[in-house]
Image: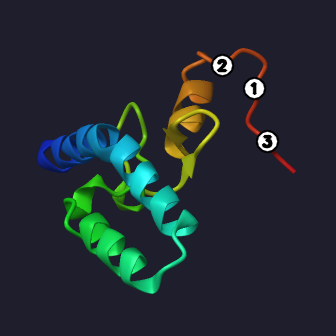
Amino acid sequence: MAKKSLIEKENNKKKLVKKYNVLRQLLRREIKNSSRIQDKIIISERLQSLPRNSARVRLRNRCSLTGRPRSNYRDFGFSRHVPREMAHSCILPGVLKSSW
């Protein structure tokens, strides 16, 4: 189980990303469409003035049940331990322990 403080930090980052997402996209589009270098510099400074944690790159994928930050399956939102534990406790039907 991950520390609750880390999970809360991640939730705050998600809120910031959601809040500034439209503004970031708008500024990136302006940089792409502007032809003068001076305009690009001014717009990029505005983009840099936004909070660092409002960038989507700063987010970390975490397990939705345990909060584990590593070895996550994106499709399910679980870490690698969770499906294994579910299979052992017979929550996942048809899954057997492999032996070879």
Question: Which of pointers 2 and 3 indicates the residue nearer the eye?
Answer: 2
Q: Residue furthest right?
A: 100
Can you give x and y, in whole percent of width and height, for residue 87 in the image? 62, 27
Q: Quadrant of residue 52?
A: bottom left
Q: Which residue is under mark 3?
A: 98
Question: Which of pointers 1 and 3 indicates the residue nearer the eye?
Answer: 1
Left or right side of 100 for 76: left
The numbered dot on residue 92 is: 2
Q: Residue at position x 55%, y 26% from top? A: 86
Can you give x and y, in whole percent of width and height, for residue 15 in the image? 25, 37
Element under label 1?
Answer: loop
Q: Vertical placement of 85 versus 89: above or below?
A: below
Element under label 3?
Answer: loop
Element under label 2?
Answer: loop
| Nearer to us in this view, 80 or 4 | 4
Q: Which residue is under mark 1?
A: 95
Q: Vertical placement of 85 versus 92: above or below?
A: below
Distance (Cα) linking label 2 and label 1: 6 Å
How many other residues sit within 10 Å of disc 1, few (<14), some (14-19) or many (≥20)? few
Left or right side of 98 for 83: left
Amino acid, disc 2: Leu
Mark 2 or mark 3: which comes first in sequence?
2
Left or right side of 81 for 97: right
